[in-house]
Amino acid sequence: MIRADGTARRCVSHLPAQLSGSGLAWAPGRHLLAVLISAGDYSLRGGYVVDVSTGRRTRGLGPAVATAAFGPSWSRDGTSLAFVSRAHRIFIVRSDGGDGHYLDLWPQR
């Protein structure tokens, strides 16, 4: 994070620098940042929620799903995230990493 004037720069995610991010999204009205990492070290790929006030990060999306996903997008109340996969599926997960499930955009064949 950095202020608009370029001061007070600080790291909030503590994710390895060599990983490639595929998406960032701020939770509405909350101090949470969703980070999707879909490239780089396979074991570190995933969807993470970072509490920028504490630096705590929670993994809500595993590497297999993250490799084929893009997004993320927050719910209006900031309690859940959606990631869209290249297989035309939406993965929904709570901001605490729980209750992950798929929604299909159309029936799978």
Image (spheres, grey):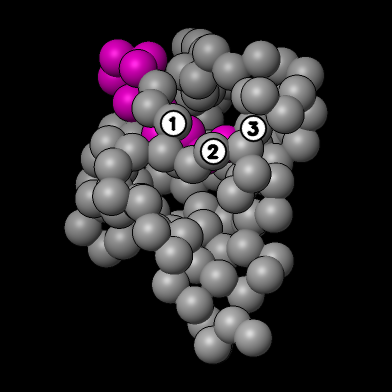
Is residue 28 shown in magenta? Answer: no
Residue positioned 71% across, 16% down in the render = 17
Mark 3–mark 2 contact, CB under 8 Å? yes
Q: Is residue 47 above or below residue 9?
A: below
Q: Quadrant of the C terminus?
A: bottom right
Q: Quadrant of residue 44?
A: top right
Up-down: is 44 above or below 22?
above
Residue 74 location, quadrant:
bottom left
| Left or right for 18, reference 48 | right
Residue corresponding to mark 2? 62
Residue 45's disc number: 3
What percent of the width, then of the height, locates residue 90?
50, 67
Q: Are marks 1 and 3 in contact (CB under 8 Å)?
A: no
Residue lying at 70% horizontally and 46% vertically, measured from the top left: 67
Of badges 2 and 1, the one in the foreground is 2
Q: Which residue is mark 1?
A: 59
Figure quadrant of residue 66 = top right
Tell me if residue 33 can be seen.
Answer: no
Mark 2 Cα-neighbour bin, 10 Å: few <14, some 14–19, many ≥20:
some
Depth check, front residue: 91 or 22: 91
Q: Does 48 sit left or right of 100 as displayed?
A: right
What amino acid type is highlighted by mark number 2?
Answer: Gly
Q: Is residue 87 above or below residue 46?
A: below
**Helix, strand or loop at disc 1?**
strand
* Residue at point 47%, 18% (across, down): 12
